[in-house]
Image (cartoon, helix red, strand yellow):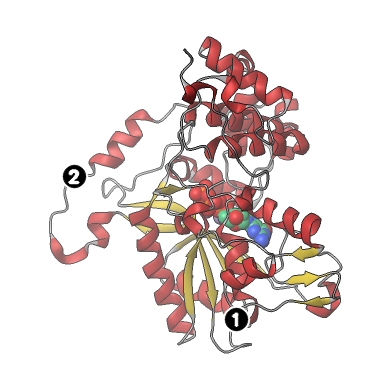
Amino acid sequence: QIDEAEVMAFSVPSYACLRRTTLDNHNPILTDALSLLAENAELSDEDGRGVAFRRAAAVLKALPETVTAVTQLRGLPCLGGHSLRVIRDILENGASSEVEFTKQSERFKALKVLTGIFGVGAKTAERWIRDGIHSLHQLQESGQTLNRAQRAGLEHYDDLKQPVTKAEADAIGEIVEKAVVSVLPGAQITLIGGFRRGKLTGHDVDFLITHPEEGREVGLMPKVVSWLESQGFLLYQKTTRNSYLEAKDGPARPASNIDRFERCFSIFKLADEEKRGAEETENPPEDRCRLAAHSQATDEGPQPTEAAGGPRRWRAVRVDLVVSPISQFAFALLGWTGSKLFERELRRWAGHEKAMSLSSHALYDNKQGRYLRATSEEEIFTHLGLEYIPPSERNA
Ligand code: 8DG
Ligand code: MN
Ligand code: MN
């Protein structure tokens, strides 16, 4: 007799924004494999294939149990022939030959290392690889001209590779809060990105800044950045101005995910915990973590130089700051909380199923020919005819 659970097929809606995806993934081996193929496709300028693999991985992330047989996947959306082949390979042979081949390939390894440098995208990495550059060492020897972001990225490579913890995110939050309130009392900051979704680590920390009085936020970013700089908190920053004008380019470029808020890409200098913890001890414990981390460092990375005074007591952390007017706050909050796939699916749902255009600034109803206002994420979900999904269940 066949165990009923074994033939039971799962049922999952095809839009990720119709599903609840927590961080409790029951199929990490399968989703890691598909995510790796997605990443390889994205790094190879094959965005269509990348999205297909991301969607397939996201469907598996939403399953309530570990998949043990391909028959359980019957009827599930977003699983194309290619993804199913990869899944079958893993379930039946313990590994996917395509994934293993990709992981080992010199090209993929080089793309990973080079795009792992802050400020380096797939295009630049591709060009360097064509010039025979596959490692950080080769890059440094090559005499390639690097822009300011890339120089900072290379200089802080080891630090930026280390995942940011929630404790570090909170410490940065306190600094940003202090900066924001010093230059504009009453301004508010909100943790966005992966940490808002409940992730315990991230590749950066993302904050959204606003002020309850419309217009008071104008010009805020340069002031915040100056404050942070004067206090020695910034190792790098690049600020871009707000260029969004509703009347002018509102519905014109509706579904664009390139938004036009005042933004700042930065690298923070964050003091080590014992230093942040301040007065509690005069003789902070030895810098074990940092020494341990360095002993594992590869020989290709630039070694952080330690001043004559001993080991350094800080690390570099990537931080993204976004300023939004209060009238757009709910859209910005929804648009910057992620995950990236969840956002993409929300916009696809809006466009294809509701004839609406969703961005991080606004929601436009194409049939009514007008913007739909919202002061909370819940209202936006309602406009879109969707059940509200809280941030912790947007981990598609
Ligand atoms: P991680 O840092 O922990 O790795 O994950 P994350 O926090 O989810 O990723 P992220 O790369 O920091 O991105 C956070 C969110 O911000 C995500 O939903 C995508 C979104 N986002 C960008 N760039 C832009 C942009 O230019 N416009 C808009 N609207 N959203 C963006 O990363
Ligand atoms: Mn992030
Ligand atoms: Mn970010």
- Label 2 belongs to which residue? 286
Q: Amino acid at mark 1?
A: Ile
Q: Residues within 10 Å of mark 2 (few under 14, many from 20)?
A: few
Q: Let me know if residue 90 appears in the view.
A: yes
Residue sitting nearer the eye, 303 or 250: 250
What's the residue type where badge 2 is placed?
Glu
Residue pointed to by mark 1: 326
> Residue at image x 70%, y 73%?
242
Identify the image quadrant of residue 110: top right
Q: Is residue 33 above or below residue 291?
A: above
Residue 122 place in picture, x, y as percent: 70, 38
Residue at 73%, 23% in the rendered image: 81
> In terms of secondary structure, where does tag 2 sit?
loop
| Residue 255 against residue 199 in the figure, above or below | below
Residue 140 visible in this rendered orientation of the protein: no
| Residue positioned most to the front | 1
Can you give x and y, in whole percent of width and height, for residue 352 in the image?
A: 80, 55
Q: Report the front residue among 343 and 24.
A: 24
Q: Position of residue 350 (x, y in %)?
A: 74, 60
Q: Is residue 292 above or below residue 169?
A: above
Q: For this view, does 124 lie left or right of residue 193?
A: right
